[in-house]
Every structure is written in C-alpha cells, then in structure tokens.
Amino acid sequence: MNGIFCVFEGIDGSGKSTQSRMLYEFTLNHGINSLLLHEPTEGFFGKKIREILKSNTLPPVLQQIDLFIKDRHDDVELNIKPALTRGDVIIMDRYFYSNAAYQGGVEFDAIDIIKMNIDEGFPLPHRVYFIDILPQEAMDRIQLRRNGNIELFEKIDFLTKVRDNYLKLIDDRFLVINGNRDINEIHREIKDDFLKLLKIHGRIM
Ligand code: ADP
Ligand code: TYD
C-alpha cells in the first residue's frame, strides 16, 4: 500500500470542501493519479446518516458512532484500500477524526473513538489538514450558504465542543491551518505542505 493519504478536517463551514477540491484540481493539473472522497459517503449508510441530519432527532451517540463506522467500513473497502494499493493520492473531506470530534463527549471520549476506528483496521492518513476557524465564523458562513436551512450539528454550542475535541486530537500528522484567511492563501499553504509530502514519499525529486 504505497499511496498517499491526505484528510481534511474541521468544523462545518471551515472550508474543507473548498480546499479539498482545490488540492484535487492541483493534482489533476499536475498529472498525479488521485481520488477525491467525502464522508459521509453516497452509499447505503451515508444516505441514512444524511436523512438523520436533516431530521429533528438524533439517535443515541453509540448508534451514531456505529452508523458512521459502517459507512466508513464500506468506504475503506471500496475506495480507500484499492487506491492505496494502486499507489494513488487520496484526498478526503472528513474521516474518522470527524467521528471523534462530533460524537466525542461525556459518554465517549474523543480519543477512545479514534481507538475504536483504528481497531476496525481503518488505515491512518499520512496528513491531516485541520482547518481551524471559530464557531461563530462557521455559523455566519453556514447561514449564508444554506439560506438559514441549518442541520442538526450546526449550532454554536455544539460546534464549540467539536472544535475543542479536534484540538485534543492534534498530533504530528496534523497541520493546523488558520482558516480565517483568503481562500487562495490557505490553498498555497496546503499545496506547499503537500509537495513536501510527495517529496518525502519519493514521488518527486
Ligand atoms: P466545509 O466543507 O468545511 O463545510 P465549505 O468549503 O463548504 O466548508 O465552505 C463553507 C462556506 O464558506 C462556503 O460558502 C465557502 O464558499 C465559504 N468559504 C470557504 N473558505 C472560505 C474562506 N477562507 N473565507 C471565507 N469564506 C470561505
Ligand atoms: P458534511 O456533509 O461533511 O458536512 P459539511 O459539508 O457541512 O461540513 O458532513 C455532515 C455532518 O456529518 C457534519 O456535520 C459532520 C458529521 N459527521 C459526524 O458527526 N461524524 C463523522 O464520523 C463524520 C464523517 C461526519
């Protein structure tokens, strides 16, 4: 498995979709074989999750963890492992760090949820681009984007907890990015780091 695996994480509205797409386009423009993925997926469990997020009620936390893990299991088997085996670059908009940050709390500690995911045999990414913005900024962006149509997790108190959990998960795989800057400036920082990663893995001289 000699692919390169990069994950984008951050609270809702932090700019993950924007930045993961920009990095993906960069790889395409440079002839790098790559794959852009997103969790929750468009698969069976991913669709179930999206229905829940649009409703008014969340299932108990353990059931939420279980649904996201089932969705991730399909993603790992169908997309992630084959791409890593081919030696491709994977760019992911959310992975198991989201599980820990969003479902972590009084019942399950964020770090324990990471362990649950690793115990499932899910591969660790080489790099986590954590785009950090304050929850109030995120809410302002979400309100603009969705015209006031807010999903279950998109509340300021909840996003504050999620951000605090992310901060607890930071290790040397993480690059913490100040997301409160110009979109192109953020892309440049990520692209520079990504090129270093390619170098470390012997993909470029
Ligand atoms: P996420 O995928 O993390 O939810 P998006 O990439 O969808 O975030 O961005 C949320 C909204 O904020 C979108 O309307 C997007 O155009 C805007 N946005 C993204 N990055 C920035 C930025 N650096 N500054 C201002 N607005 C941004
Ligand atoms: P997503 O579609 O990425 O939302 P957005 O584009 O607004 O960031 O993800 C939907 C929601 O699912 C998001 O609020 C985060 C949540 N989520 C979890 O709670 N646990 C998880 O394991 C994953 C992958 C996502």
Image: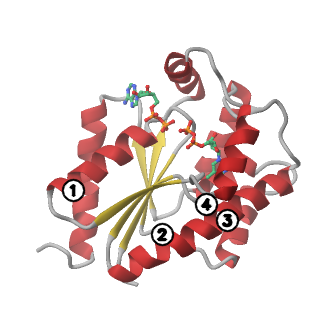
> Which residue corresponds to the image point at 32% horizontal and 78% vertical from the top-left?
87
| Rendered image: mark on residue 114 | 3
Residue 91 is situated, as x and y percent measured from the top left of the image, at 39, 58
**Labelled pair 3, 4 in contact (Cβ < 8 Å):** yes
> Which residue corresponds to the image point at 30% horizontal and 52% vertical from the top-left?
24
Query: Mark 4 is on which residue type?
Result: Phe
> Which residue corresponds to the image point at 73% horizontal and 70% vertical from the top-left?
116
Query: Mark 3 is on which residue type?
Result: Ile
Q: Find out if the beta carbon at label 4 lies less than 8 Å from the nearest ligand 2 atom.
A: yes
Query: Mark 2 is on which residue type?
Result: Asn
Front disc: 2 or 3: 2
**Labelled pair 1, 2 in contact (Cβ < 8 Å):** no
Q: CA distance from mark 2 to mark 3?
A: 20 Å
Q: What residue is pinned by disc 2? A: 79
Q: In this image, 180 relative to 148: left or right?
A: left
Query: Is disc 3 placed on a helix, strand or loop?
Result: helix
Q: Residues within 10 Å of mark 3 (few under 14, many from 20)?
A: some
Asked if 126 appears above or below 44 in the picture, the reply is below
Front disc: 3 or 1: 1
Q: What residue is pinned by disc 4? A: 96
Q: What residue is pinned by disc 1? A: 28
Front disc: 3 or 4: 4
The quarter of the image holding the C terminus is: bottom left
Query: Mark 1 is on which residue type?
Result: Leu
**Labelled pair 2, 3 in contact (Cβ < 8 Å):** no
Residue 183 is situated, as x and y percent measured from the top left of the image, at 30, 32
Q: CA distance from mark 3 to mark 4?
A: 7 Å
